[in-house]
Image (tube, rainbow, N blue to C red):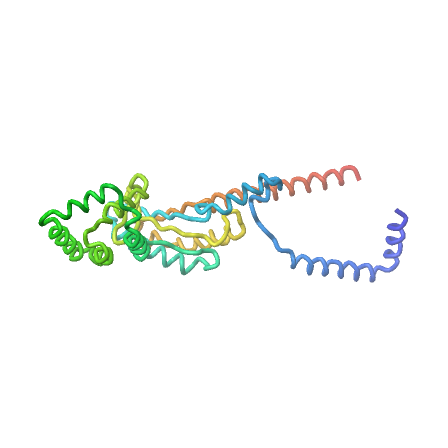
Amino acid sequence: MWLFLRIYDWFKGHRAVMWAVLAATVCLSVIASLSIDLKEDVTDFLPADKENQDVCWAFSHIGSANKIVITVSATDSTADRYMLMDAVDSLESRILGNVPSEYIKSVTARVDADSITDVMGFIVDNLPYYLDERDYDRLDSLMAVGTLDNELAAAREVVASPMGGLMRSVVTKDPLMLSSERLRSLEGFNTGGTFSTTDDYIFTKDGDAVLTMDLAFSSSDTYAAGKFIKSMDKALEGFEEAFEGKVTADPLGSVFIAYSNSSQIKRDSILSIIIALVLIAFLLVSYF
């Protein structure tokens, strides 16, 4: 205790030095604070044991956790699918123009026809691995008189149809369309027929258009989430007015929930600190 009293007495007689030391200490503190790397992660509130760390890691690496789905819905009976398609294109442009690229990996407004062609080509190229007893029975039936000609004529009609551009590569490799059953089985991945496509645009069974986004950051990174959400709000400004209020866009994703929870925790923490400081100051004034 005597050491602090000696320091106090010395500074009391050398006030200029005291203020210089205080100013230097404040400057050094400010400079040191600038090098602090702040991190906002809502999962940091959980205890730092291995079980919670595993849960946080799994949550951060779930594919759907970093995905946003935006539904574009009609609010007026005059808004048809073509207006919703135009709205999806407009929304995509607004997002790419307002949201920094560092926050998004990709924006999907339409089905990638090249990807569909690649999947179909893979199945056709590896068709022998997918054949079953029914396919071999069908091969036997093709040997009947006139059957082969009919199959080739049907393949010619497929090439000449509006879908010919997509099916041409399949028909060229598989003119008897032995792969048709295998390709048709891919529809099973559309669980419950929830989605359909029109001109490569994705629609729900309720008729709403869908646009998806893959984020470049974890949904638990609430600092990046806050910046992203502000840029999304800017992208959505004036969107409904541009279509005379006939369509609306509703984004949905875990990043919005995480940011909302983090903001509430931050507000509660600041309020708690303010109340604690007021109570401490009141006690100090009351007793001293």
In the image, taking residue 5 as reference, residue 212 lies left or right, namely left
Residue 6, can we see it? yes
Is any part of residue 87 visible from this angle? Answer: no
Tell me which corner region of the image, top left, top right, bottom left or bottom right, holds residue 98.
Answer: bottom left
Given residues 262 and 255, the one toward you in this image is 255
Which residue corresponds to the image point at 79% horizontal and 62% vertical from the top-left? 20
Residue 73: x and y in percent read 31, 46
Compared across the picture, whether 37 is left or right of 260 comes to: right
Q: What residue sits 71% from the left and 57% below the top?
A: 29
Q: How many marks?
A: 0
Residue under the point 36% across and 56% down? 92
Of residue 221 and residue 82, the one placed in the foreground of this image is: 221
Residue 267: quadrant of the picture: top right
Residue 147: x and y, percent? Answer: 11, 48
Q: Position of residue 288 (x, y in %)?
A: 80, 40
* Residue 62, horizontal then vertical, whole percent: 47, 45
